[in-house]
Image: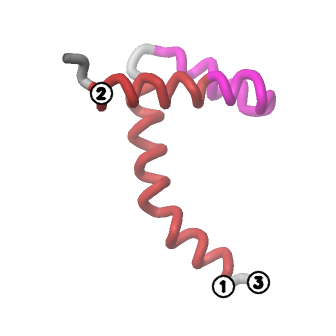
Amino acid sequence: MADTNQTNTSQSAAVLTVLYDGALPGWRWLALAGRLPGAGWLMERMYRSFLRRRPMLQRLAASWD
């Protein structure tokens, strides 16, 4: 049986790389860096960390209005 967590991690990093390369041309440098060995793993960990902090960041941004 395939390790679904590993598959999801690889797919998420691949999607981010495609997004940075095609839809967000200003972030192309990040897409190029995302193709380096181990970069997909690091990008996934950073994204997961951001998702945990996102509610706090949203509250902080809302308080500035």
Tell me where residue 20 appears, x and y as whole percent.
Answer: 68, 29
Quadrant of the drawing holding the C terminus:
bottom right
Occupied quadrant, residue 5: top left
| Disc 1 to disc 3: CB gap under 8 Å | yes
Instruction: Describe residue 57's horizontal placement relative to residue 11 as left or right.
Output: right
Tell me the SS state at disc 2: helix
Could you classify mark 1 by the number of other residues whose Cα lies within 10 Å: few (under 14), some (14-19), or many (20 or more)? few
Tell me where residue 59 appears, x and y as whole percent.
Answer: 58, 78
Q: Name the chief secondary structure element in magenta.
A: helix
Q: Amino acid at mark 1?
A: Ser
Instruction: Describe residue 39's horizontal placement relative to residue 26 as left or right.
Output: left
Q: Amino acid at mark 2?
A: Thr
Rounded to the nearest whole Å, what is the CA distance between mark 3 and mark 2?
41 Å
Tell me where residue 22 appears, x and y as whole percent.
Answer: 76, 23
Tell me the SS state at disc 1: helix
Could you classify mark 3 by the number of other residues whose Cα lies within 10 Å: few (under 14), some (14-19), or many (20 or more)? few
The one of 45 and 15 positioned closer to us in this rendering: 15
Per the rendering, the mark at residue 4 is 2
Q: If you read the primary sequence from the N terminus, does the residue marked by circle 3 or circle 2 appear first?
A: 2
Q: Which residue is mark 1?
A: 63
Q: Which residue is mark 3?
A: 65
Tell me the SS state at disc 3: loop
Q: Say which residue appears at 31% left-offset and 25% top-offset.
A: 6
| Disc 1 to disc 2: CB gap under 8 Å | no
Above or below, 52 relative to 45: below
